[in-house]
Image: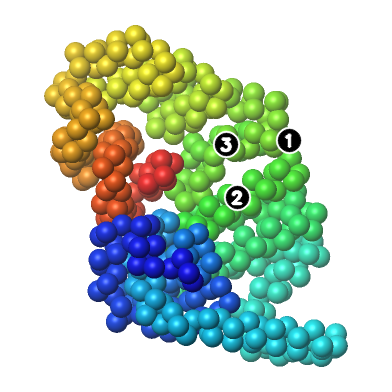
Amino acid sequence: MRGLTEASLKQPAGARSFERGLGYLDAVSGVEVGDGWVTATVHGTERYEVEPTLDGPGGLGGGCDCPFGLEGNSCKHLVALGLSMLARRESLPGQRKAARERARGLDGWLSALSKDELLAVLREQIEKDRQLRRRLELRAASVHGDLAAVRARIRDLLDIGPFAQYGHVEYADARAYADQAGQAVSAIRTLIGSGRAADAITLAQEAVRLSAEAVGSVDDSDGRLGQTGADLADAHLEACRAAPPDPEELARRLVGHVLGDVDDGLTDIDPIDYEDALGEEGTAALRQSAVEAWRGNRRGWAEKHLMERVAKAGGDVDTVIAVHAADLAPNGHTHLIIARELDTARRCDEALHWAERGIRESRDLSAVDTALADQARAGRPADALGVYLRLAEPLTTQTGNTVYGQFVALLLNIRDCHRRPGTEDEFAAYVTALRAARKRERNLLRLMDEHGM
């Protein structure tokens, strides 16, 4: 606790979150102190669970399940609990010591039990706790390789029926549903650990499909179900690495997922991550499939994105340029994307050519404004920020993948303008409000996620 001070709270949170946290001191309740951890509830717009750690870098780590906290930020609720801990810091060492003694006492008691006694305790808990029983049943089926039982249980876990009223899972029930769905990930990983990775691949693919069917009927405002989707993608990747399937078949499946065979906006599977499982043969098949898909639909957002990702992974700048050049936006935005790619590749003369061409061919002045703001950003970030915000404003009410690409490009510039003077907390608040307002636009959120926003 020596590193926990008001300064250590303010530094990661920023001035705005810190000041707002001061107003939430009376909203902190249910504080429970363990050995190196704390849990508490902070009542804000909703009831949020805050779980800082006492021994993280700077004295306080952890997080909160509010939308801002789920993005990895140090939010006002975490600040409020940190300040509450400071107010009682004299009693914390004693509370931690008591927690260690309780943990040692419990461990000692359990260790002293015979196998039969331990089983009796466990069975007693299983009878009282239905969720515990179901988790253990699923783990047992996974360890024993009972694929039919695991598949049936995963289907039950991802069924929204028990949580849905009128066919939709409301926010109040979404957390419980997401926690239940997360058990499917555990089951798949247990299969991998027990040497059944090939079966785990099959079940992961089915779980991805089921989550895709469910996501449109769940209010996932706090992002928990989205995290489950990301965990499913990770489990699928782990299984493929543990038991690589036919490389060409895997390549076709990955391309099919990206191009919309599973159009969920939830499970973000990136084919480039599968390089180890694909090998040279699969990677070649992946590139060939990406080329064929893009040639068949050069203006399709998914096709363009896949082709660009594959080309960048192979260091093929010319193909990246060709992808963008095949579908130039009339406002000059695409020209400037090409210019940035060429500038990054240190092909400055070509970059300048494309920037000037964008200004000439633009049907409005937004490209000119963008070019001027780009020039001003390093020395006058506040001036450039005003331009970017003005250009972004009309896009906040528009949809479509082309618009999303333009909008995220502006957001990257806006973020850079905030980083230079050290006002990242203002950008974080802007992004949090934006994500909440546009939470149903999965392709936009996916693109923002790819750029760390």
Q: Which residue is mark 1?
A: 246
Residue 155 is situated, as x and y percent measured from the top left of the image, at: 60, 64
Going by the numbered disc 2, the residue's amino acid type is Asp
Q: Tell me if mark 3 has few (under 14), some (14-19) or many (20+) residues whose alpha carbon lies within 10 angstroms of its own.
A: many
Going by the numbered disc 1, the residue's amino acid type is Asp
Which mark is on residue 336?
Answer: none
Residue 281 visible in the shown view = yes
Left or right: where does residue 383 sit relative to residue 70?
left
Going by the numbered disc 3, the residue's amino acid type is Pro
Question: In what element is the residue under mark 1?
Answer: loop
Q: Observer-nearest residue: 369 or 201?
A: 369
Vertical side of 392 occupied by 333: above or below: above
Question: In what element is the residue under mark 2?
Answer: helix
Residue 193 is situated, as x and y percent measured from the top left of the image, at: 76, 57
Residue 436 is situated, as x and y percent measured from the top left of the image, at: 30, 57
Q: Tell me if mark 1 has few (under 14), some (14-19) or many (20+) residues whose alpha carbon lies within 10 angstroms of its own.
A: few
Figure label count: 3
Q: Residue at x 73, y 83 (%)?
A: 107
Vertical side of 391 occupied by 147: above or below: below
Q: Which residue is mark 2?
A: 234
Vertical side of 72 occupied by 265: above or below: above
| Labels 3 and 2 touching (C-beta < 8 A) | no
Identify the image quadrant of residue 401: top left
Q: Observer-nearest residue: 119 or 212?
A: 119
Q: Which residue is mark 3?
A: 271
Q: Residue at x 30, y 19 (%)?
A: 335
Residue 431 visible in the shown view = no
Left or right: where does residue 200 sit relative to residue 303?
right
Tell me which label, 1 or 2, sits earlier in the chain: 2
